[in-house]
Amino acid sequence: MKKLLTFTALGTILAAAQVQAAGYHLREQSAAAQGNAYAGATAGAENLSYAYFNAASITRQKGTNINVGGTYIAPKAEMKNVRDAGGHRDPDSHNVVHAAVAPNMAISHQLNDKAFIALALNVPFGMITKYDEAWAGAEHGVTSKITAVTATPMVAYKATDKLSIGAGLQIQYLKAKLTSRKFAGLPTPYSPRDGYNSTVEGDAVDFGWQISSMYEFNENTRIGLSYRSKIQHKLNGKSKLNPAISNSGLPSILPEIADQSIYAHLNTPAMFSMGVFHQINEKWSVMAEYQRVFWSCFRDLYIRYKHGDALVGGQGVREKWRDTNFYAIGASYQIDNQWKWRFGLAYDQSAVRMNHRTPRIPDSDRLWYSTGLNYQYNEKLSFDLAYTYIYAHKAHLDTARTGNSGSHVTAEYTNSVQLFGVSLNYKF
């Protein structure tokens, strides 16, 4: 019984990776690139914010530069036609995924004609979902919150007049908090309002790397390539159990399992990106982007737990995520000496297979529609604004398909996201 209860509490961490569109990747790292739906982000290099996508791009940032920005992420996830195993219907929910802010900043310095250094701070992974504690699928998840903050010191070198290369060290802090309601060990019958609340919290600091290149065919055309490595995290933390509503069979077993140490491995995926940029004339430029995110690294998760100082066991669950593709095209129009208009379209695949969709990520393939403005205040100072509407295909949930333990729940999701990006760029 102890192992069963412990595992059901720890099992919620499996969904930590199931928290954001296209897995739990936050692409929102540059208001300038967002205006073009991230088309050409790996070749853009218009300001320092593009360094996140391509470390080699900082060779185009002369002198000392700073970029500070952020994106307000306003998702809308409506859950309808929710039914449990008995066919009983739950109320619809109109606020499953919660809003969040993804900040970013970078600073660079030119050492000489060929060498450049930079430091970028980003939040490349994260999300928040929250359901009512008594909903029919509470055993599969109530609250999910994950945040990954990454500091990346970078160096870039202009090898020739046309070729630049860059590299970076990713220092990533990952924190997760997940809650659910469990019913194992309770006398039957019980309702979703019975049981006990399970909370799992854990964090880790681990390392990865980035290599990039940029080739400029001429002053109007360039291509960028970038690869970010997978980061293997070992989360350490605690699991806690508390009664939801008094139950005669529950208090006697809670004291021995209420607080335990947890250990779980969770990867952030490797990513390969390729972007192209072409300046047609003084007014128009066009760009395109392809990105492959290697989510198939998240196929199995093995959970371990300890009692005192002794490792007492562990269990594994299969997730079967798939690698995803991101495609984007965009264009920019120079209105006058100070204003530039950007726009773009993108298609983004979901990492979650239909038969493995869980309530923690009501995810599906999506289309991006983006636009933005750049305002050049003077030679040193400029601003970027961007807006994106993301339409996601309808998603059907059937927990019986996943093969994971827990109550049987079906539901339909209608998802969309609005992104509001802003940034400031300054040249010293």
Image: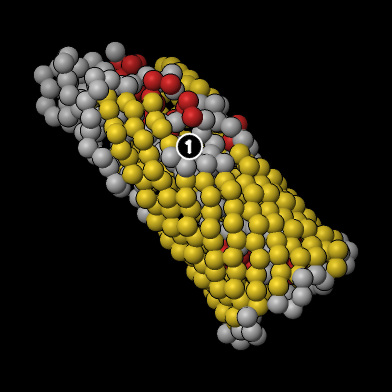
Identity, as a three-letter code, of the amino acid under mark 1:
Ala
Location of the N terminus (image quadrant) = top left
Q: Report the front residue among 154 and 19.
A: 19
Residue at the image point whose x is 69% and y is 45% from the top: 272
Tag 1, which secondary structure?
helix
Residue 85 image position (x, y, % from top left): 28, 20
* 78 to 299, vertically: above or below: below
Location of the C terminus (image quadrant) = bottom right
Residue 226 image position (x, y, % from top left): 72, 51
Residue at the image point whose x is 74% and y is 63% from the top: 277
Residue at the spot of label 1: 17
* 306 to 204, vertically: above or below: above
Work out which residue is located at the far right of the displayed protein and give it: 160
Q: Is residue 79 left or right of residue 322?
A: left
**Location of residue 37 (image quadrant):** bottom right
Residue at the image point whose x is 46% and y is 64% from the top: 420
Residue 347 image position (x, y, % from top left): 58, 48
Q: Report the front residue among 265 and 415.
A: 415
